[in-house]
Amino acid sequence: MGKLKNQTNTNYSINETDIYLRYTGRKKLVLVVLVCLIILVAIVAVNAGSMNLNLYQVIQSILGNGSNVSDVVIWRIRLPRILAAIIAGAGLSVAGCVMQNNLRNPLASPSTLGISNAAAFGANLAIIVFGAGSISSTSTDAVTINNPYLVTVSAFVCSMIATMVILLLARIRSFSPEAMVLSGVALSSLFSAGTILIQYFAQDFQIAAVVFWTFGDLGRIAWPEVSILTCLIGVAFIYFMFKRWDYNALDSGEETAKSLGVNVERVRQGGMLVSSLIAAVAVSFLGIIGFIGLVGPQIMRRIIGGDHRYLIPASALMGSLLLLISDTMARTMVAPVVLPVGAITSFFGAPLFLYLLVRGYQKK
């Protein structure tokens, strides 16, 4: 009888192990597929553009044996742009994933909390008030931003001001996640009103420069900005993975998380601060790029579930893939004209999000 009982327990343990291995194996397979898709799209992107380069020329240029023209196209234009799409897409999507968990709201994103609108206000302030926008003395009267670093710093500072106001209100008044979202909506409205007032007194070319900045453009980024984004998002990703078990506990509710020893307030404020920092830097460098932080985590949550051990890296990879595809389409749809990538992400992101939303309610 004892042998039969031990054999039953052993078989039960083996079955549990098999189920768990299948559970984790499927999620790992999804991650591998996403990595392969990103590599495939990156290869297409580095060959795509108004200047036709074949794969051999691209490889020779990467190895340092290309012509002067191909080296300029690959190393100064396409590679920084592709890496920026991969890194910024990953950062925005991971930021949205953590915000949605911390606030327990599937609609949470940098736009929801007013970070994007705050950055737009900062850009307006730099271009219009501080004179960072100008008009070239050419026959085409091209509108340019003559001090992009001032615009970037101003956008970043205003984004972080919005973040700190929300976090301070949450700390002082013990705001609930719902109240944090509402305070973000209020700040978004406030910054939008400030932007309108500044533009009302601006000249035509200054407004044109502001509109150009808000489009969202990966072409304005260079290797120094790519390095900054890589370092920041890399450190943030490590932090998020270190907190992955806390985020899993938060998914079960605050009371359950507290019973498991999670300091809910500290985890929430830390996650929101790091997520907002990622969004602020990305928006200040690239302009407003919508829906990546909203749609990426939602897609992966429906594919692999809510386990943040896999959801965080999967969201990062999906964000990279979405932004890389969008930027490649923006460069090739009406080449040699380059469309604003922010318009592409919004154009495809909005219907996709509505589809996910309707499908989610149908399941309920």
Image (cartoon, helix red, strand yellow):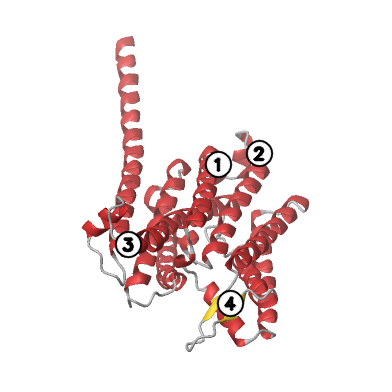
Q: Mark 2 vs mark 4: which is more N-terminal?
A: 4
Spatial distance from mark 4 to mark 3, Cα to Cα?
Answer: 34 Å
Q: Mark 2 vs mark 1: which is more N-terminal?
A: 1
Q: Mark 4 vs mark 3: which is more N-terminal?
A: 3
Q: Mark 2 vs mark 3: which is more N-terminal?
A: 3
- Residue position for label 3: 68
Mark 3, secondary structure of its residue: helix
Spatial distance from mark 1 to mark 3, Cα to Cα?
Answer: 41 Å
Q: Which mark is residue 210?
A: 4
- Left/right placement of residue 63 relative to residue 196 reads left
Q: Are marks 4 and 1 in contact (CB under 8 Å)?
A: no
Q: Three-letter amino acid code at disc 4?
A: Val
Q: Which of the two residues, 272 or 362, is positioned nearer the viewer here?
A: 272
Judge whether residue 114 can be spotted in this image.
no
Quadrant location of residue 177?
A: bottom right
Residue 105's spot in the image, x, y percent? 56, 57
- Residue position for label 2: 263
Q: Three-letter amino acid code at disc 1?
A: Tyr
Residue 287's spot in the image, x, y percent? 53, 67
Q: Are marks 1 and 3 in contact (CB under 8 Å)?
A: no
Is 348 above or below relative to 279?
below
- Residue position for label 1: 239
Q: Three-letter amino acid code at disc 2?
A: Asn
Count residues near mark 4 (Cα–Cα under 10 Å), then give few for <14, some for 14-19, many for 20+: many
Count residues near mark 3 (Cα–Cα under 10 Å), then give few for <14, some for 14-19, many for 20+: few
Q: Mark 4 vs mark 1: which is more N-terminal?
A: 4
Residue shown at 67% from the left, 43% from the top:
266
Q: Three-letter amino acid code at disc 3?
A: Asn
Mark 4, secondary structure of its residue: helix
Mark 2, secondary structure of its residue: loop
